[in-house]
Amino acid sequence: MKKSKKCRIALVQPYCGEIVCPPLALAYLAANAKENGHEVLLIDLQLPNSNSKYEEVLRTFAPDIVGFTAMTPQIAAANSLARKAKSVLKPEVLTILGGIHGSVLPDETLRLYDSFDIIVIGEGDETLVKLCDEYDDVNSMRSVEGVAYLDKSSNKVVINKKALLSNLNQLPFPHYEYNFCHYLKTEQFLPHGVGFAAMMASRGCPFPCTFCAANRYGRRYRTRNPNDVVDESEKVISLGARGLYFMDSTFMTDRKWCIDICNVLRPLNVKWCVDGRVDLVDRELLEIMAASGCYAIFYGIESGSQKILDYYKKNTTVNRCREILKLTRECGIRTTASFILGAPIETREDIEMTVNFILDTKPSYYAVGILSPMPGSKIYDDLIKSGHEFHYDKLTRDHATISTSGVTKEELEKVMSYLKKVRPQICESWVEIK
Ligand code: B12
Ligand code: SF4
């Protein structure tokens, strides 16, 4: 039976570094919990001066539950924020952790970071509503599907499995839950320009890239109804967006659906950008995308060496990467390409191939980072098996965390700095969209 009592829940987005991006995960959760009758406050600590007000905002809102999201680099910060919440409110206030880190390492997280009472594994939209419905009974909360907790009497971590959401159209739009105007003005989507609203038209990733954790849970690819996507697009345009950025893991996985989306976006006459894979596009699709307003595609190219592409399981060739970058430009779409230096098997020659690839192909913009083996990725699992230890707060792509075959960490960082330094000479300057 559905409880009639409203739960008050605060959802906290920790600071994620200089590149800021709307807290879409928490915004989806907040919109859905509100629609199901609960009171929600999203506390976004990425916003300027938000940290100093954290305790006061919590005290004023006085939530029954405080939820946190964390990728691996934020896990320690999220734990401190949860501890602070318990001290500001009352020790019994329930703290929940969601997001990729706790989802892929629930056992370790519950034992190592003692401020979290419950972890939500994988997609949390339905699970959070159920937790809010049961908020005044910890035992009922612990039996909700999709949660993990540490049973102190047996010292065992209990995990209740849950299936993925099958109907994405049931989710309300997330854009009223965060400071939409602030994120429109920031340069979070630098490769694409300011003014783009973050959107998600599909979820899940069926591909096996070995450096990535996004495919660990939620592999099943699910798409939203194109008409629902258009409604949301019109909504964000009415709120001031001048373009749309689809941040889906793999927007072009279902070609027919992708074409359907292009057809419904075309009449809106709006510029849009998307993340893509070179093995999923061809001239026909690129022309359809360009005609419907596609302005830029962010390709995960990763390397100019075939050996490294194979190691990353990219399912493509260096030649195809070259061809698709060229073809995309010919179709009138800007290209952003991302590269990763420093796979464990990477040699100096492989790195040279990547540098030459960038200099030859001259993408409209490129991003370059050093491999940071993230929990949830195959490379992380392999390194752990071979005895590596990682400091989670050091796992960022700006610094080398592992050495490779014959290339020192210092050399890797030097090549990255060089590629960033020469970027303005190689790339076009990005233009603000009108
Ligand atoms: C957007 C994004 C970002 C944004 C973050 C925006 C934000 N404020 O949240 C930005 C650009 C800032 C970012 C930065 C980084 N990111 Co990032 N990012 C993503 C991306 C592309 C999409 C995430 C997203 O919004 N999904 C949409 C929402 C709806 O889905 P979701 O996040 O899975 O959320 C659901 C569940 O996880 C759960 N949930 C999440 N939080 C919570 C909280 C509660 C309380 C509950 C109940 C449930 C819950 O419910 C949600 C709704 O169903 C993912 C890749 C992907 N496709 O997932 C990588 C990803 C999350 N990022 C990743 C990485 C590695 C990074 C960086 C560390 C990169 C780097 N090496 O420097 C940096 C962080 C730097 C730092 N200093 O901390 C990894 C994380 C791996 C890991 N083990 O942590 C991912 C998985 C990609 C990858 N290559 O593996 N990223
Ligand atoms: S890099 Fe992209 S395509 Fe590859 S597994 Fe991650 S989300 Fe999927």
Image (cartoon, rainbow, N blue to C red):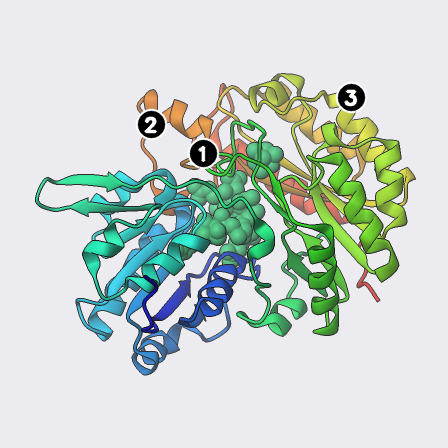
Q: Quadrant of residue 375?
A: top left
Point out residue 151 in the picture as x, y percentages from the top left corner. Answer: 15, 45
> Which of the two discs, 2 and 3, labels the residue nearer the N terminus?
3
- The amino acid type found where label 3 is placed reads Asn
Query: Badge 3: how crowded within 10 Å, few (<14), some, or many (20+)?
Result: few
In this rendering, position of residue 7 left or right of residue 270: left
Q: Are marks 2 and 3 in contact (CB under 8 Å)?
A: no
Extreme-top residue of the structure: 307
Residue occupied by mark 3: 319
- The quarter of the picture where the C terminus appears is bottom right
> Which of the two discs, 1 and 2, labels the residue nearer the N terminus?
1
Q: What's the distance in space between the residues labelled 1 and 2, CA to CA?
A: 11 Å
- Compared to residue 391, the image places residue 206 above or below, namely above
- The amino acid type found where label 1 is placed reads Pro
In this rendering, position of residue 278 left or right of residue 19: right
Q: What's the distance in space between the residues labelled 2 and 3, CA to CA?
A: 34 Å
Identify which residue, 392 or 328, lies in the foreground.
328
Per the rendering, the mark at residue 388 is: 2
In this rendering, position of residue 113 left or right of residue 242: left
Q: Quadrant of residue 66?
A: bottom left
Which residue appears at 68% of the width and 35% of the height?
A: 253
